[in-house]
């Protein structure tokens, strides 16, 4: 069975979202973290854990695209977006081939909708 380029990218993106890609970076915008953390003790830690759990269990919809690199959901009354971008291994330029894990570093950014 031949795997299409889109399917390969989607699989690699799923590994990134699930925390199974050791080369991937996960970034949460400052405004997103601050808004969700509030003034609670350990608020930032709890907000990060809840954000990551929500991204990991995100159920993609047909309009989200075949590569599974973008999603949107509501959390604690806020609209949250996540996006996976593809870079070269030095994070200096875009990846030449997002379907090839040996030349691509994924960056998963989690943000408020207003940050986009």
Image (tube, rainbow, N blue to C red):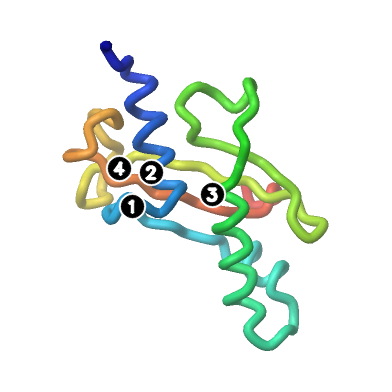
Quick one: label 4, few (<14), some, or many (20+) residues within 10 Å?
some
Q: Earlier in the sequence, mark 1 or mark 2?
A: 2
- Identify residue for label 3: 56
Pointers 1 and 3 in contact (C-beta within 8 Å): no
Quick one: label 3, few (<14), some, or many (20+) residues within 10 Å?
some
Residue that appears at 46% across and 47% down: 17
In the structure shown, which secondary structural element does the residue marked by tag 3 occupy? helix
Mark-to-mark CA distance, 1 and 3: 14 Å
Q: Earlier in the sequence, mark 1 or mark 4?
A: 1
Question: Depth check: 116 or 106 in front?
Answer: 106
Instruction: Note whether 15 is above or below 43 in the view shown.
Output: above
Residue that appears at 27% across and 53% down: 23
- Identify residue for label 1: 24
Pointers 1 and 2 in contact (C-beta within 8 Å): yes
Mark-to-mark CA distance, 4 and 3: 21 Å
Q: Earlier in the sequence, mark 2 or mark 4?
A: 2
Mark-to-mark CA distance, 2 and 3: 10 Å
Mark-to-mark CA distance, 2 and 4: 16 Å
Pointers 4 and 3 in contact (C-beta within 8 Å): no
In the structure shown, which secondary structural element does the residue marked by tag 2 occupy? helix
Position of the N terminus by quadrant: top left
């Amino acid at each position: 069975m031949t795997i299409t380029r889109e399917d390969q990218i989607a699989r690699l993106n799923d590994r990134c979202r699930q925390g199974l890609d050791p080369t991937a970076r996960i970034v949460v915008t400052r405004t997103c973290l601050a808004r969700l953390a509030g003034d609670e003790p350990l608020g930032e830690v709890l907000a990060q854990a809840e954000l990551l759990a929500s991204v990991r269990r995100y159920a993609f919809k047909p309009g989200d695209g075949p590569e599974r690199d973008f999603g949107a959901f509501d959390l604690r009354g806020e609209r949250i977006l996540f996006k996976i971008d593809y870079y070269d291994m030095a994070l200096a330029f875009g990846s030449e081939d997002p379907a090839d894990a040996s030349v691509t570093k994924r960056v998963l950014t989690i943000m408020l909708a207003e940050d986009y």
